[in-house]
């Protein structure tokens, strides 16, 4: 079986054609950015691109994708960070980080086809990616920041919500 | 009131933020012995190593499963060391109790327990650098000071970088505790700022930093199949058929221990009996499970039925007092006899699973004389000690490497999967990666215990709370002691504030393993008690906020200087702040409501207000949640805020529809389609406000979780008039949309 991952061709001769792409990437090719979370297309941790579109690699048997182009988080930015990865760092999105490769692949695919997504667009594109740690508000903020780059605007505002009171004394009881 | 960040502040934050982000992509799976740079380095103590090229390596002692301590703990060292954070490289410390003490992730204790130690480590290392410079320059030590990563002598204008000084500084004796002066909070450069997670760069690039990513030479892959009826063990299995399958290297029965495991983290060496399937890759092992046939011996297995447990518990909780008295203060009999009115309510919560996103895995290499494991355990020290006990080896023969975990929430406190991996590795004589499936993870958790509360309040004519009864119904495997997480919490509010209190307990039988689930015990108590306090306020026509403020009683710190005890002054401040932020009392359209919840746990005083709307089909939209908290000082503002935002999401997620049901001792839910986690479209807007103070910092991982459920359920009541007394709220017919 032939597999092209991040622009590189691989020959997986002995691989079980039933093997989901996720396990081929992780165990056979040593590309472990895509994660196993559920194995049943519920969580999105395994999200990669197939011919540029986000897919759940835990549900894609090798037999179904021979000859097609796979992009994983390792190949997303090329030599530099992709604007979505940069925005993810700037917004300090991750807690445990386990879901984030999948989140980033979904978000980058969204911006690729829709550089200026509405809130509804973001909700629709990201609903398949669970973040058990609950980083959703930062994910939205990071997508909005990255979207500005996609539109050629400057990377100018983080837009975090938290405030810190200077002292106890400022709150009137 | 001027609180917080204007636009100018935001701009500055961003600059700081992104430069940290770009500079700090270096932490990850490397351990101290194998730090990434090859430049020569000198250690000043177990936490601080300075390279000749200027890089400052700081060891992160405790496991990080998403709570951010690999960033927060090194920040504390860096602050007192006066290190330039952009030059800091965070590495994971080896597991070594002699050098790093208790290395665990639990109880929101990492920051709280290590606050003094790590400040001291940073400060003594800085002092050694200063003394070394003073000697070299022939200047009095008192004339020297530091700027980030360098020592200055202002009178002469001399300066030297830490890297230039470190070799000589290692010759300095380590200053005693009293010889260094810790920084004043006003002088902090780093603490309290927004600092990007030290692992952020690795995470966004998909680098191999998680337990599941570990690979060692000659490693094979295994899955381990246990009896669905918890505590059953295998009698026979079609092993020969399995071994004939492609990619399968071995298949065998591990006799193991019969009966459900206990959550005794220190002592348990339980290995559940099961069938190990060893393969050349993960998929081959998982696929072979389809062909597996096992005959199980279920004589010692659990026979739990969760609906039967619930029925027994609810009927018991209907009685005002239970089988055992736990606490009797004042004259509760009298208070209820003389009450002008009595309010009662029975509250119930279900079993809940952790569902951390990374299923359990462990790489182990066990030989006759030594064991090496790589694991995302929250208690690597107990992994080491229980492996030593199980394999009858000296502790020194066990090496445990800490690895970042994809979520913990208490699930990684136990080490049964570490023992399973070691047993399999020893049998096959090779290093092995044991991978639990999601289905394994859901079927063999140490669940959040269900809990049931029969609550009663005695009220005076003016609506003052004069008496309090709580009949706690707990699951118990032996009929004597409550299972983990099911017992009496024993805390200060309202129990210690109301004058006349009676607490009692009744046990109902259950053998399903339970354990610590984020803010254990507090999470279910908060729901029941803080909802019930709202019931009381409502029944007596009082505003919930005002009632709560009054019910907290006099200004009092229950055990002065013990951060883990309630301080009613701090409690009232967070309630005042959050209600102010949410514009408590404002008019809302029909079907919309605000709800308030307060809770004190893990040394954190936290109040939350939720705004929800409820439609005629009982669909609940959680629009916004405001959080105000007093955790003392904040170490990493971005990290703490992230934990709080996540706690709110977790709270909504759990209360919506998370429920583990049990039939004939087996868990019915198998994966996320039956056990839903909150998704982005359902996630509310969250506002976090930390009321910082000079108190030492306490942990941020847990205390924001307990108030979520009562705040939302109280808001639902205010929106539609229906009181929710059952979690998840789906069991009362509500649906979070
Ligand atoms: S692992 Fe593929 S969707 Fe969860
Ligand atoms: S950051 Fe932990 S699951 Fe998303």
Image: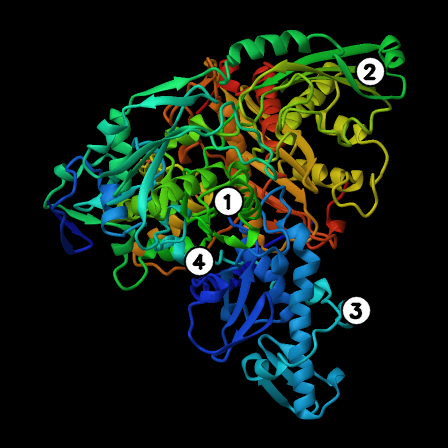
Q: Nearer the viewer, residue B336 or A63?
A: A63
Q: Which residue is mark 2?
A: B459
User: Could you tell me which chain the residue with mark 2 belongs to?
Assistant: B
Relative to B192, residue B337 above or below: above
Element carrying mark 1: loop
Q: Is residue B622 visible?
A: no
Q: Are marks 3 and 2 on the same chain?
A: yes
User: Could you tell me which chain the residue with mark 3 belongs to?
Assistant: B
Q: Contact, CB < 8 Å: mark 1 with mark 2?
A: no
The label shown at residue B377 is 1
Q: Contact, CB < 8 Å: mark 3 with mark 4?
A: no
- Residue B606 left/right relative to B242: right
Q: CA distance from mark 3 to mark 2?
A: 54 Å
Q: Nearer the viewer, residue B624 or A39?
A: A39
Question: Ligand 1 is found in which quarter of the picture?
Answer: top left
Q: Are marks 2 and 4 on the same chain?
A: yes
């Amino acid at each position: 079986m032939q597999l092209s991952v991040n622009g590189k061709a691989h020959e997986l001769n002995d691989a079980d054609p039933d093997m989901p792409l996720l396990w081929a990437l992780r165990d056979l090719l040593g590309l472990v950015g895509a994660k196993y979370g559920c194995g049943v297309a519920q969580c999105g941790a395994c999200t990669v691109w197939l011919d540029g579109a986000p897919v759940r690699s835990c549900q894609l048997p090798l037999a179904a994708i021979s000859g097609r182009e796979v992009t994983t988080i390792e190949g997303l930015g090329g030599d530099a960070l992709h604007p979505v990865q940069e925005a993810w760092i700037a917004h300090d999105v991750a807690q445990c980080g386990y879901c984030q490769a999948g989140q980033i692949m979904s978000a980058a695919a969204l911006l690729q086809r829709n550089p200026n997504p509405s809130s509804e667009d973001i909700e629709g594109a990201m609903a398949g990616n669970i973040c058990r740690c609950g980083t959703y508000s930062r994910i939205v903020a990071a997508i909005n920041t990255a979207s500005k780059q996609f539109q050629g605007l400057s990377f100018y505002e983080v837009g975090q919500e938290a405030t810190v009171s200077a002292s106890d004394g400022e709150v009137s009881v | 009131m001027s609180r917080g960040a204007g636009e100018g502040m935001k701009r500055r934050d961003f600059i700081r933020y992104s430069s940290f982000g770009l500079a700090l992509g270096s932490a990850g799976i490397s351990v101290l012995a194998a730090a990434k740079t090859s430049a020569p380095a000198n250690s000043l103590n177990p936490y601080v190593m300075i390279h000749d090229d200027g890089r400052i390596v700081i060891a992160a002692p405790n496991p990080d499963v998403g709570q951010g301590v690999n960033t927060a703990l090194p920040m504390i060292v860096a602050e007192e060391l006066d290190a330039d954070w952009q030059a800091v490289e965070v590495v994971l410390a080896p597991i070594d109790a002699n050098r790093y003490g208790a290395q665990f992730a639990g109880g929101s204790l990492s920051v709280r327990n290590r606050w003094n130690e790590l400040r001291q480590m940073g400060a003594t290392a800085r002092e050694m650098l200063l003394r070394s410079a003073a000697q070299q320059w022939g200047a009095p030590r008192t004339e020297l000071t530091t700027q980030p990563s360098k020592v200055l002598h202002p009178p002469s204008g001399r300066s030297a970088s830490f890297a230039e000084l470190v070799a000589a500084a290692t010759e300095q004796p380590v200053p005693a505790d009293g010889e260094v002066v810790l920084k004043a909070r006003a002088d902090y450069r780093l603490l309290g700022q927004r600092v990007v997670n030290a692992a952020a760069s690795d995470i966004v690039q998909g680098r191999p930093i998680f337990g599941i990513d570990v690979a060692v030479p000659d490693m094979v892959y295994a899955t381990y199949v246990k009896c669905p009826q918890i505590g059953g063990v295998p009698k026979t299995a079609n092993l020969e058929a399995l071994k004939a399958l492609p990619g399968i290297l071995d298949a065998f029965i591990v006799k193991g221990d019969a009966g459900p495991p206990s959550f005794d983290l220190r002592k348990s060496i339980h290995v559940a009996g099961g069938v190990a399937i060893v393969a050349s890759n993960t998929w081959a092992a998982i696929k072979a499970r389809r062909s597996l046939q096992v005959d199980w011996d279920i004589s010692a297995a659990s026979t739990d039925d969760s609906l039967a447990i619930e029925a027994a518990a609810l009927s018991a909780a209907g009685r005002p007092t239970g089988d055992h008295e736990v606490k009797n203060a004042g004259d509760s009999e009298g208070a209820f006899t003389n009450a002008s009115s009595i309010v009662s309510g029975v509250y119930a919560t279900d079993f809940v699973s952790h569902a951390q996103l990374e299923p359990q895995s462990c790489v182990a290499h066990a030989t006759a004389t030594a064991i090496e494991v790589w694991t995302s355990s929250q208690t690597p020290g107990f992994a080491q000690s229980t492996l030593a006990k199980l394999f009858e080896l000296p502790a020194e023969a066990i090496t445990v490497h800490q690895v970042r975990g994809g979520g913990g929430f208490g699930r990684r406190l136990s080490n049964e999967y570490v023992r399973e991996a070691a047993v399999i590795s020893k049998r096959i004589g090779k290093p092995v990666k044991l991978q639990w499936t999601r289905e394994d993870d859901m079927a063999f958790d140490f669940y959040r215990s269900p809990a049931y509360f029969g609550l009663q309040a005695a009220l005076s004519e003016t609506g003052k709370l004069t008496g309090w009864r709580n009949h706690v119904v707990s699951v118990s495997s032996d009929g004597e002691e409550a299972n983990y997480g099911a017992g009496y919490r024993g805390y200060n509010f309202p129990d210690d504030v109301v004058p006349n209190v009676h607490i009692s307990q009744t046990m109902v039988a259950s053998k399903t393993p339970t354990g610590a689930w984020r803010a254990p015990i507090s999470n279910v108590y908060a729901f029941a008690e803080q909802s019930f306090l709202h019931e009381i306020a409502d029944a007596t026509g009082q505003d919930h906020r005002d009632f709560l403020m009054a019910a907290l009683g006099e200004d009092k710190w229950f055990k002065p200087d013990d951060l883990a005890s309630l301080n009613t002054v701090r409690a009232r401040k967070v309630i005042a702040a959050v209600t102010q932020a949410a514009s408590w009392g404002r008019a809302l359209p029909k079907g919309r409501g605000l709800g308030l919840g307060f809770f004190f746990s893990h040394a954190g005083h936290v109040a939350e207000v939720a705004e929800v709307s409820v439609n005629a089909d009982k669909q609940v939209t959680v629009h916004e949640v405001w959080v105000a908290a007093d955790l003392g000082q904040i170490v990493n503002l971005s990290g703490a805020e992230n934990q709080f935002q996540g706690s709110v999401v977790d709270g909504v997620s759990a209360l919506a529809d998370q429920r583990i049901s049990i039939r004939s001792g087996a868990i019915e839910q198998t994966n996320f389609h039956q056990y839903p986690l909150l998704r982005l479209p359902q996630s509310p807007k969250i506002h976090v406000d930390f009321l910082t103070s000079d108190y030492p910092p306490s942990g941020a991982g847990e205390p924001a979780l307990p108030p979520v459920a009562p705040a939302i359920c109280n808001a639902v009541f205010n929106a539609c008039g229906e009181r929710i007394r059952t979690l998840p709220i789906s069991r009362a017919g509500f649906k979070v949309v």
